[in-house]
Amino acid sequence: MDCYVVLWIPTIVYNDFSKPLEKSLEKNISDIPGKELVVRLELSEEGDFSVFSKIGERFELIVELKRKQVSSNGLMLFSYNSTSDEENGFRFTSTEFPTAVYHMIKSFYHVHDFHDSDTDSSLPPFVSSETIDIQSKDNKALLHYLNNYNNVISNTVRYIQLAIRSTRRNKEEIRPETRSGIQKLCLYARGYEVYMGVLYHSKYNTISNTESKDREWRHIACNIENGLRYIRTIEREYGEYTQQRFVDKVIKDAESSLKSSNKSIKISKISYFIGIASLVIGIVSFFAALKIARQSTNELRDVRDALKQEIEIIPASLSETESKIQELKAEQDSLHTIDINTQEQIQSVSKKVDDLFWMIRKMSE
């Protein structure tokens, strides 16, 4: 039995998807801890996908997805034969298509700008037993994804309101982790706004708008647009709150630094006064040493004067001392019979006498 699936590939700009990011991809898609369910996808040059499941040590082909049509707004139409993998629980039928396989196919063309690949959205794929033209106005696949877009925005608004109401009901200030969670929800919804905008504003959507004659789709359009306005307002409010918290933290850090600086200034003042006191003590010590030095100088002068008086006595007897030295020299000359050792002794005595004479002469000067 022939089955059809239309997959929406999120895109920021209109795209022909001729340049895939991958050629093959292998992933464990099991959500049961400790159990593996490894799937491998291979992409052909024509844009077809072969889906393999790992059984034991080898991969077995489960289904071939033949690409039939591509729309620049991100929709892709594939056909396949209905099949089920009883061992792994895979079912590719006219009513079922594994969401995990859908998200693996998205990874061949889509970059996760607003979330991690592990936290990708869980939009259900559009499956049918009949083929459709995805480039026709208000086709079923397009409306399927726009309706899911409405659900995402409405649920995001509901989650944000519940978070805010629960804290206000308890008269508590919204905790930082709650604010962070709200900001993440806003970012998540704004990511949808970017990608779904290509579908929502495409020429193929003529029914889902605020001026539509169809009541249901007019309400859906109002929900989407008003929900996004609400999310932008909350995002701005909490963004400003986060910025204010940052500013408050900067001011608090600055005040803390100022207090530390004041303490340093006080310590510097104490050090300054200690330095001044040390300088005063040094000056006092200098003048005390100078006074002692002056006293010592006066004492030295007294000693010098006393020496001068002693030296003045020496010249008076200088002539008498010289006469005695001459007599000693005369006696030395007369002792010609003295042996060599005695002569050396006399010479030594004579030298000492000469030295004494020289010292006396110097002192008299």
Image (cartoon, rainbow, N blue to C red):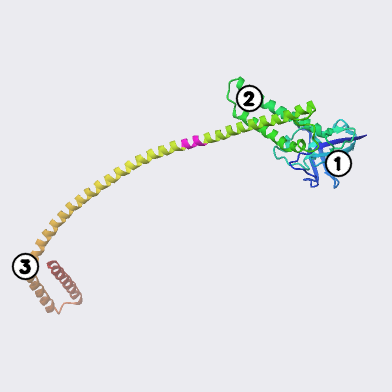
- The quadrant in which residue 314 appears is bottom left
Q: Nearer the viewer, residue 84 or 82?
A: 82
Q: Secondary structure at mark 2?
A: helix
Describe residue 49's horizontal placement relative to residue 312 as left or right: right
177 on left or right of 206: left
Residue holding disc 2: 164
Which residue is painted at 60% across and 22% down in the image?
Answer: 168
Please tell me which residue lies in front, 118 or 322: 118
Find the magenta span and give its range. Answer: 250-256
Q: Secondary structure at mark 3?
A: helix
Mark 3 or mark 1: whose residue is earlier in sequence? 1
- In the rendered image of this protein, does residue 65 appear above or below residue 149? below
Q: Residue at x 8, y 68 (%)?
A: 315
Q: List the residue tagged with mark 3.
A: 316
Q: Position of residue 169 (x, y in %)?
A: 61, 20
Q: Is residue 97 visible?
A: no
- Which residue is denoted by mark 1 in the rendering? 69
